[in-house]
Image (cartoon, rainbow, N blue to C red):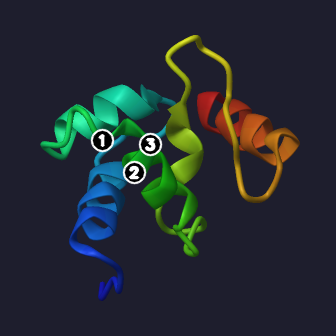
């Protein structure tokens, strides 16, 4: 797959592909995973810049509080995708 974005965006999108269906991670853990532990906001922006949500599961990232956080296609859809993956 060819991904076009900044180095950080591509690293974040690749990390998103490693999150198994039904699992979630936080923006902070994702930032640590890509080697940018202090760049949580930049990582969140990279998650939001994903235009291929049907292929790159950005819905699997939530806030540290457990809240869903944002989602380009709406929180109702994000919740539905997560619920569907849990079966």
User: 16 left or right of 69?
Assistant: left
| Quarter occupied by residue 19 | top left
Secondary structure beneath dot 2 equals helix
The answer to whether 68 appears left or right of 52 in the picture is: right
Image quadrant holding the C terminus, namely top right
**Residue in view at x 35 percent, y 61 percent:** 13
Marks 1 and 2, how far apart at CA: 5 Å
Q: Which residue is mark 2?
A: 42
Q: CA distance from mark 1 to mark 3?
A: 6 Å
Q: Position of residue 43 (x, y in %)?
A: 38, 48
Q: Position of residue 14 (x, y in %)?
A: 27, 61
Residue 59, placed above or below residue 26? below
| Residue 27 position (above or below residue 2) | above
Label 3 belongs to which residue?
41
Residue 8 circle label: none
Q: Residues within 10 Å of mark 2 (few under 14, many from 20)?
A: some
Dividing the picture into quadrants, the one containing residue 69 is top right
**Residue at image x 76%, y 34%?**
79
Asked whether the residues under the numbered discs 1 and 3 touch, taking CB atoms below 8 Å apart as contact, a structural biologist would say yes
Proximity of marks 2 and 3: CB atoms separated by less than 8 Å: yes
Q: Quadrant of the N terminus?
A: bottom left
Q: Which residue is under mark 1?
A: 39
């Amino acid at each position: 797959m060819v991904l076009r974005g900044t180095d950080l965006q591509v690293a974040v999108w690749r990390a998103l592909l490693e999150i198994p269906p039904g699992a979630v991670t936080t923006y902070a853990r994702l930032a640590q995973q890509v080697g940018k532990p202090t760049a949580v906001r930049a990582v969140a922006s990279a998650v939001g810049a994903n235009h291929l949500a049907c292929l790159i599961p950005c819905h699997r990232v939530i806030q540290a509080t457990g809240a869903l956080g944002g989602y380009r296609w709406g929180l109702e859809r994000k919740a539905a995708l997560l619920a569907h993956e849990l079966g």
